[in-house]
Every structure is written in structure tokens, then in C-alpha cells.
Amino acid sequence: MTAASPPEVLRAPLVVEFPFTRSLGPVQSAFLTGLRERVVLGVKTSDGAVMVPPVEYDPVTAEELRELVEVAATGTVTTWSWNGAPRPHQPLATPFAWVLVRLDGADTAILHALDAPGPDAVHSGLRVRVRWAEERTGAITDIACFEPHEGPEGRGAVPHDGQFAGAGAVTGIVAEARLDYTYSPGRAQTAYINALAEQRTVGERCPSCHKVYVPPRGACPTCGVATTDRVEVGPAGTVTTYCIVNIKAKNLDIEVPYVYAHIALDGADLALHGRIGGIPYDRVRMGLRVEPVWTEGGRYPDHYRPTGEPDADYDAYKELI
């Protein structure tokens, strides 16, 4: 008889992103407004050095900095690294070099992309210039990239008041932080997810301390040994702690306020997370007995609702808070 092969470990693409909105102080505002107007601004430090990109406080003395200067759009590569396989949303779709460029008139280098035919065309000391984006909005991407340049060295830094005629100053930005990767939950959580699709909740028991972990982690965090014995728990459980959510999450079709809780399923020694429904949010309490509610075709509980049982005694769940 041939032994059954273990189930395939799950894998799926996962995107983690966070659009961070921030306001700008006067120095950063002037810098980004300048890029929109095809002007590169730096700031003078207390010892007279010119920093590009500018900062608002001296990195040595912590003194507030406000003396803006304009530097040239030409400069010199100080160091570089070749990127032969650009990823989505990077500055160029074709292979390019990441470079640190010290612009003429600046004492620090700025990081950006260099459009070059290949790594043999790039070297420290290479003269380059800014290639401006056709459409500029007041962001670092207004510099489309750098490109090789054989012209003379640009003039040094000259004072600038940070003011630009025409459209108003850039006062805020949205920084799109995004991470794309392939996630695998591993052997233990693959079994847990597959069981949820069958409307069962399965954890794993530590062979040393005998605690049952749900969701399982593959190893006991206390004893450091592998957990292999699977244990079905629940389906009912007890609310140990909870919070009332008053801010509506993007792409989540749930009306606020609602309650998100830690729920210790019967037989488990670790509380899991779940939304509480079927009861007004202000009537949820510690010790409330709840059970999972599954939607048709759902692979995990949509929410948990009261079972109608008496509340659990505090001593029965205090160790799981």
C-alpha cells in the first residue's frame, strides 16, 4: 500500500501597502515645489555645507535650517549599482543604474536612476544631468532620471528665497509604501486553513506543555518544540477582550461601530481574533459565549455571535487575556 502524500503547502501572492499622507515643512515644501518648476534646491548647514535633498535640522547640531540655495541640474556620480531587472513602478522600465549624484554646488549626494545603455557605460566620476519629467507635480519623480552629460560643470550654489510664481506651493505628499511577495503559511497553518474551509477549527498540541495553539504555529513558542498532534477545538468560545472599532476601513463593507474581539475557543489555549455580530456593539462583554457564523461558500467564519449560554466565569479564561 502506498502511503498518502502530505497535502500541498499553500502559497499565494500577497500585497502589503500603506499610502502615507504627510504634510511638509517650509524646506521640504520649497524643495518639491522647485522640482515642479525644474529647479533643484538645497539647504545650507551651520558649517556652510549644502545638503541636497535638503533637511530641516542640522544632522550634527540639530539646529533648525532655513537658508535655501539653488544648485545646478548637473553633477557627478559618486557610486552606483546596476539594476538589470527593473521591478514594476521603478523609475525606468528598461535596465538602469541606481546612482548617488553629487550635484554641482552641493556637498551631499542624491539617490536616483541613471539611464545608461549598460553597466560598462557607468563609473564613479561620470558626469550626468537631470532629465526632467514631461509632467511634473511636485514630487521626487519630477526628476525622471539622470542621463550622461559631457557639458561643463555647473555653477555653484546661489541663494534662493524658496518662492515660485504661478501655481501654489506643494504642501503635502502621499508616499505609497508597497510590498509584493509570495506568502506561504507553512505546514501547520495550511492544515488550519484547509480545515476552516470544512467549517472546522483545528489547532496543534505541544507534546511538552500540552497547550493547544489556535491558529497553530508549527512549534510551541514556550517550549520550542514542534507541534504535530492536531486537535479540533470549538466551535464555541469565550470573548476574553475586545475593542470597539469606530473608523471604517477601506474596502471593508462593515458599518461602524463594530466589535473586534479575542476569542478563546473551547479546548484552545490561545485566543484568536474575530468580529462579533448579532448583538449591539455596546452589549459585548468579557466572558460572552459566542459561536462562529459561516456564509455560504465561505472559507472562514464571517463573524461570531452569542450562543445564548450564560457568560463564562472570569477564572475560566483569565489566563488567556
Image (spheres, rainbow, N blue to C red):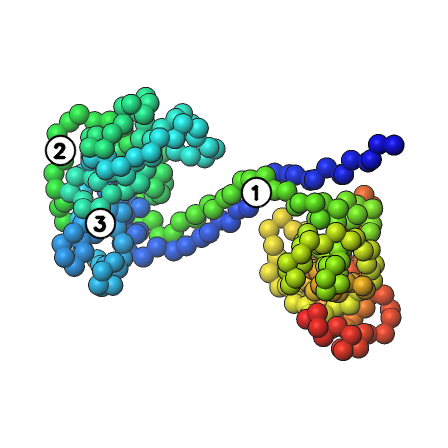
Q: Return the residue at label 3.
A: 51
Tell me the CA gap for discs 2 and 1: 44 Å
Whether residue 27 sits left or right of residue 204 in the image: it is left
Whether residue 25 sits left or right of residue 1 in the image: it is left
* Residue 79 figure quarter: top left
Residue 80 position, x and y percent, is 30, 35
Residue 183 position, x and y percent, is 61, 42
Name which of mark 2 and mark 3 comes first in the sequence: 3
Q: Is residue 4 visible?
A: yes
Is the Cβ of the residue at disc 2 closer than 8 Å to that at disc 1?
no
Residue type at mark 1 is: Val
Residue type at mark 3 is: Met
Name which of mark 3 and mark 1 comes first in the sequence: 1
Dot 1 falls on a residue whose secondary structure is strand
Q: Return the residue at label 1.
A: 15
Is the Cβ of the residue at disc 3 closer than 8 Å to that at disc 1?
no
Q: Taking 255 as reference, is 14 above or below it?
A: above
Residue furthest out toward the top: 117
The foreground one among 301 and 9 is 9
Residue type at mark 2 is: Glu
Q: Residue at x 82, y 74 (%)?
A: 311
The foreground one among 271 and 150 is 271
Tell me the CA gap for discs 2 and 3: 18 Å
Residue 153 tag number? 2
Q: Residue at x 64, y 42 (%)?
A: 184
The foreground one among 98 and 228 is 228
Dot 2 falls on a residue whose secondary structure is loop
- Mark 3 is surrounded, within 10 Å at the Cα level, by few (under 14), some (14 to 19) or many (20 or more) other residues, namely many
Q: Taking 232 as reference, is 190 above or below it?
A: above
